[in-house]
Image (tube, rainbow, N blue to C red):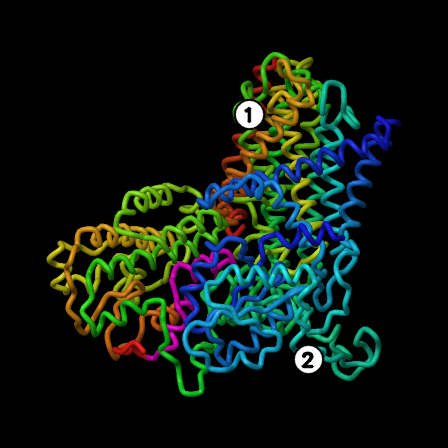
């Protein structure tokens, strides 16, 4: 329990400390006028909101990442029992990884990594 | 460890580390630029810049997401704190040396992605938005090498706890046994803190990127949080690859500090000498080169550990 | 609080530069001045530094950027050349001698200490886009969506090469965007982080009532050499300095700002004896894998080299035209044009680096050789022929096609690789006389 409490305290304290810096009462408060709140465009004025259906061109790569993330989930416990299990564990994980690496090759050839 | 003591220790470590990083960065910048380096100035410069930011007014944009914008630096800093929690700062002295410290670190660093993205998206301004999305593309690419090299370091220790990994380096450090580990880790670490060549989030071509609309104490919070993340990365790297608190003569904590500073200095030097990567080029390199290298690292160290 | 103020007073003054007419040379030395830090966004700045003269079309953008500076803020003007009077109406403007960093720091220190009042916002506090509709979120009004959400419209959709229809942001990126050359206005249709279309907006340096003013260009020495006999050494030294200044800007955009400052210092104090240092720098940059990967294949213009505007851009694509080959003074020195192949941003960078090294070497060998005035002269951006269009105006025409379809970082690399000067582009032709 004690390590959990300490870790939680650390996470919360660091987060709150940096969060609180934002409200430091050292600057002179003043109401911002509309021109002071215009997004920076090098002197130009925006016509539309920036929030939009942004074209996330790397969506194919994100799927590849998901596959490897699932592989990570398997590798974590594998790393712990690896030495006791011996060469068999090495070969089994190697086979698993080879299949996934074939996945990367396929994605690369299909252009998932082109245009990110 | 007592929670209050833990907060004090981690706060001190992150704070001192961030300040040291800022000093190293200033010194390196002046050195590369060929400007005279007066140490008195270089050492006080971060404090002066922070003081100026404290006195400046916090800007806002027309229709931001105020809550997410406020939360983002706090989230980044909290994750840096979580990452530091599992690192043994001296023999047997870790805030929370859990049995799966590597997993905790990986999870914390994944949430960093959320923090940086929110910081870019909340401003409702084109350049921060592009910075946020670019960061995610880079982040998805370096996450895999990061996780893989940490697993490779866990193999000889037969445990995912960082304390066990440090203990397993009593004979030789991982940087020697697994030469591929540290370079890949540094690349991923620079990506996590969007530093130097991997500065897609706050790059100069986006007029400051996610930090383009931030000023005053909010800017101070963001710069602090970003440096906290880099310090956490360096601490973890020192523990996992440079042998942690092992070392002759000096106490373990001092060795940890020296090794962390060495990694910070290396990161700063790389930041000033390597140009920012092109997004697509880096993604291809990460998936086609870095991941296979990380896999080689895993299997070779596995074979050696047997 | 007093401690914080005392600390802040001694900090480096963060300055956002606004480069007006005639100010480009001064602006390139800004990074070298002690106690001043150039920032890339007005939100990080405390001082707005106006260098040179503001044309009527630059005033509104400058006011917009001024209001984006967080308080406490001050505006400082470094006048260069004749003052057209537009800045006299700027309240709170402090005029300081051009290049006077100490004066700027004094103003900054006063600002931080509280002795000097912060500039009030200069533009009227009018909501730029009014609410339409009746409810608090813009709902309930007439029209298809019942009102405009949050006052500004949301971006519209446009087809995308992936077969999707996603939003496209129409951005009007103004003349004061730091990575761009000062005065470049780009109307960009940004879909995600890809520039689908780009067009160059109205050149603000053309907006003087009496027409563009051929004021002190940064290539002034070359325009003068069209009519006056000039020493070859002096001309080549100016050329090398120009290329190094360009290199400093390019490195800053690529994230190497400390190295950029070093190059800028080299450019400012360049002498023919600096040959070895420049060569070492050039060798290092040519070998840099990160710069190579950031620029290779970026910004190639889909035209045969012979159709490109003559100058370093064309020579980087393989076309070996150089007005210096017809010049007897250069032929006597055994001049051969430097040519690269590829036509992308990397080739252009190597081209300018190579030309800088060559120019420095020529300057060292030329001695007292003088170049007689003639109809054509090879300027650092291209040939200057009296009565013909300036090189920058030809290069500006390439920008829209070069940027279409590029990712944002690549678009910036491309624009920087063209080495544009909007003041030069505002001139419809090369004047033979330097006013």
Quick check: marks 1 and 2 in contact, CB under 8 Å? Answer: no
For label 2, count other residues whose C-alpha is less than 10 Å away and answer few (under 14), some (14-19) or many (20+).
few
Which residue sits at x=62%, y=69%?
A: C157
> What chain does mark 1 sit on?
B
Q: Is residue C262 above or below residue C343?
A: above
Which residue sits at x=74%, y=34%?
A: B12
Q: As drawn, is C33 to the left or to the right of C334? A: right
For label 1, count other residues whose C-alpha is less than 10 Å away and answer few (under 14), some (14-19) or many (20+).
many
Foreground: disc 1 or disc 2: 2
Residue situated in front as seen by the camera: C160 or C222: C222
Q: Is residue B229 above or below residue C164?
A: above
**Dot 2: element:** loop
Give the residue pinned by disc 2: C124
> What chain does mark 2 sit on?
C
Give the residue pinned by disc 1: B297
Q: Toward which corner of the image does residue B124 lie, by quadrant?
A: bottom right
**Dot 1: element:** helix
Residue situated in front as seen by the camera: C347 or C386: C386
Q: Which residues are magenta?
A: C399-428
Figure quadrant of the C terminus of chain C? bottom left
Mark 1–mark 2 distance (CA, rounded to whole Å) = 62 Å
Which residue sits at x=60%, y=15%?
A: B305
Is there any visible trace of residue C164 in the rendered image? no
Q: As drawn, is A30 to the left or to the right of C252? A: right
Q: As drawn, is C249 to the left or to the right of B160? A: left
């Amino acid at each position: 329990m004690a390590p959990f409490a300490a870790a939680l305290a650390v996470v919360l304290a660091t987060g709150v400390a940096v969060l609180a810096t934002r409200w430091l009462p050292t600057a002179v408060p003043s109401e911002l006028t509309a021109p002071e709140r215009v997004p920076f465009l090098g002197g130009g004025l925006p016509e539309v909101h920036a929030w939009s259906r942004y074209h996330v061109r790397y969506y194919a790569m994100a799927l590849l990442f998901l596959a490897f993330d699932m592989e990570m989930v398997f590798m974590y416990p594998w790393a712990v029992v690896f030495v006791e299990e011996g060469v068999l564990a090495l070969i089994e994980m190697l086979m698993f990884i080879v299949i996934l690496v074939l996945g990367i090759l396929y994605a690369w050839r299909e252009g998932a990594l082109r245009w990110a | 460890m007592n929670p209050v003591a833990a907060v004090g220790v981690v706060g001190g470590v992150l704070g001192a580390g961030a300040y040291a990083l800022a000093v190293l960065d200033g010194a390196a910048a002046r050195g590369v630029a060929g400007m005279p380096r007066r140490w008195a100035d270089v050492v006080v410069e971060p404090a002066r810049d922070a003081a100026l930011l404290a006195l400046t007014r916090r800007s806002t944009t027309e229709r931001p997401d105020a809550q997410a914008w406020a939360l983002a630096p706090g989230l980044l800093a909290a994750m840096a704190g979580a990452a530091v929690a599992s690192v043994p700062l001296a023999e047997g002295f870790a805030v929370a040396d859990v049995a799966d410290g590597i997993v905790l670190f990986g999870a914390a660093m994944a949430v960093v992605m959320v923090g940086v993205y929110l910081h870019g998206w909340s401003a409702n301004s084109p350049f921060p938005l592009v910075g946020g999305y670019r960061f995610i593309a880079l982040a998805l690419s370096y996450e895999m090498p990061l996780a893989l090299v940490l697993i490779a370091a866990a193999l000889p220790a037969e445990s995912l706890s960082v304390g066990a990994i440090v203990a397993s380096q009593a004979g030789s450090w991982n940087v020697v046994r697994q030469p591929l580990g540290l370079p890949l880790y540094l690349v991923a670490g620079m990506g996590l803190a969007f530093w130097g060549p991997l500065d897609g989030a706050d790059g100069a071509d986006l007029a400051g990127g996610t930090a383009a609309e931030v000023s005053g104490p909010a800017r101070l919070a963001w710069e602090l949080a970003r440096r906290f993340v880099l310090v956490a990365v360096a601490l973890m790297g020192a523990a996992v690859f440079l042998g942690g608190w092992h070392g002759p003569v000096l106490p373990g904590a001092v060795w940890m500090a020296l090794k962390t500073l060495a990694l910070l200095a290396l990161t700063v030097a790389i930041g000033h000498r390597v140009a920012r990567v092109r997004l697509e080029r880096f993604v291809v390199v990460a998936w086609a080169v870095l991941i296979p290298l990380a896999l080689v690292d895993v299997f070779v160290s596995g074979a050696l550990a047997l | 609080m007093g401690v914080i103020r005392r600390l802040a007073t001694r900090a480096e003054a963060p300055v956002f530069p606004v480069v007006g007419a005639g100010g480009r040379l001064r602006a390139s030395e800004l990074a070298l001045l002690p106690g001043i830090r150039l920032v890339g966004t007005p939100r990080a700045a405390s001082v707005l530094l106006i260098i040179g003269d503001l044309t009527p079309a630059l005033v509104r953008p400058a006011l917009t950027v001024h209001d984006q500076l967080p308080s406490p803020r001050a505006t400082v003007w470094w006048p260069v050349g004749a003052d057209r009077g537009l800045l006299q109406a700027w309240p709170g403007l402090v005029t300081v001698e051009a290049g006077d960093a100490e004066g700027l720091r004094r103003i900054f220190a006063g600002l931080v200490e509280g002795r000097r009042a912060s500039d009030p916002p200069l533009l009227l506090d009018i909501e730029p886009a009014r609410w339409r509709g009746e409810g608090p979120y813009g709902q309930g009004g007439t029209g298809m969506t019942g009102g405009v959400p949050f006052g500004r419209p949301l971006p519209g959709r446009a087809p995308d090469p992936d077969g999707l229809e996603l939003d496209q942001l129409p951005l009007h990126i103004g003349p004061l965007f730091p990575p761009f050359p000062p005065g470049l206005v780009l109307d960009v249709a940004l879909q995600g982080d890809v520039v689908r279309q780009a067009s160059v907006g109205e050149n603000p340096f053309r907006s003087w009532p009496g027409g563009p003013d051929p004021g002190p260009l940064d290539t002034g020495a070359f325009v003068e050499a069209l009519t006056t006999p000039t020493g070859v050494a002096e001309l080549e030294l100016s050329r090398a300095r120009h290329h190094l200044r360009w290199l400093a800007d390019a490195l800053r955009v690529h994230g190497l700002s400390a190295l950029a400052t070093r190059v800028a210092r080299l450019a400012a104090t360049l002498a023919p004896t600096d040959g070895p240092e420049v060569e070492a720098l050039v060798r290092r940059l040519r070998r840099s894998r990160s710069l190579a990967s950031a620029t290779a294949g970026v910004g190639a213009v889909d035209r045969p080299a012979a159709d490109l505007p003559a100058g370093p851009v064309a020579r980087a694509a393989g076309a070996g035209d150089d007005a210096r080959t017809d010049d007897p003074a250069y032929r006597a020195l055994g001049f051969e044009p430097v040519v690269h192949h590829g036509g992308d941003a990397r080739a252009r960078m190597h081209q300018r680096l190579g030309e800088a090294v060559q120019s420095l070497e020529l300057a060292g060998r030329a001695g007292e050789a003088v170049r007689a005035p003639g109809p054509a002269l090879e300027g650092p951006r291209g040939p200057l022929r009296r009565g013909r269009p300036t090189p920058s105006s030809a290069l500006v025409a390439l920008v829209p096609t070069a940027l279409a379809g590029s990712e944002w970082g690549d678009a910036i690399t491309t624009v920087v690789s063209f080495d544009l000067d909007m003041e030069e582009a505002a001139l419809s032709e090369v004047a033979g006389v330097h006013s």
